[in-house]
Amino acid sequence: MTDAPKLSPKAILVLEAISLGHVYGYSIMLNTKLQSGTIYPILSRLERDELILSRWEKRGTAEEEQRPARKYYRLTRNGVRRLQRCDGAGTTAESVLAGAGGRQ
């Protein structure tokens, strides 16, 4: 994975949110304070780069709760490794937010 694409600070923030259990788009938005126009392109890139996997929840679950179906995300092994490398380099959600003055 030496030629793996570099992760942006916001992508690192999204990976960390998923690792902490925020596993669908709206939950990731609330946790990271990023907007949907930022979150969903990042999720697409992370999935393309095989750092996360996604799956749609069962239709019946969403219907029972009278809401749209959610797409759930989880880290792949490569995603876990990349996040660990970022942590080792001192790039965490806290440092990303601090670098942006606490806002994204």
Image (cartoon, rainbow, N blue to C red):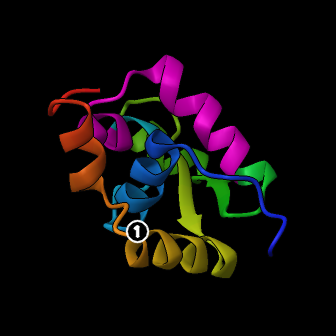
The residue under label 1 is: 19
Snapshot quadrant of residue 1: bottom right
Give the side of residue 4 with respect to residue 72, left or right. right
Q: Nearer the viewer, residue 62 or 26?
A: 26
Residue 54 in the image: x percent, y percent? 66, 56
The residue at the point 39 percent across, 21 percent down is 35
Helix, strand or loop: magenta stretch = helix
In this view, 84 is above or below 40: below
- Assign the C terminus to one quadrant of the image: top left
The residue at the point 25 percent across, 39 percent down is 99
Snapshot quadrant of residue 29: top left
Residue 30 located within the stretch drawn in magenta: yes
Residue 31 visible? The answer is: no
Q: Which residues are magenta?
A: 27-46
Residue 17 in the image: x percent, y percent? 35, 56
Residue 80 in the image: x percent, y percent? 55, 77
Badge 1 crowding class, 10 Å Cα cut-off, few under 14, some 14 to 19, many 20 or more, is some
In this view, 21 is above or below 77: above
The residue at the point 67 percent across, 51 percent down is 46
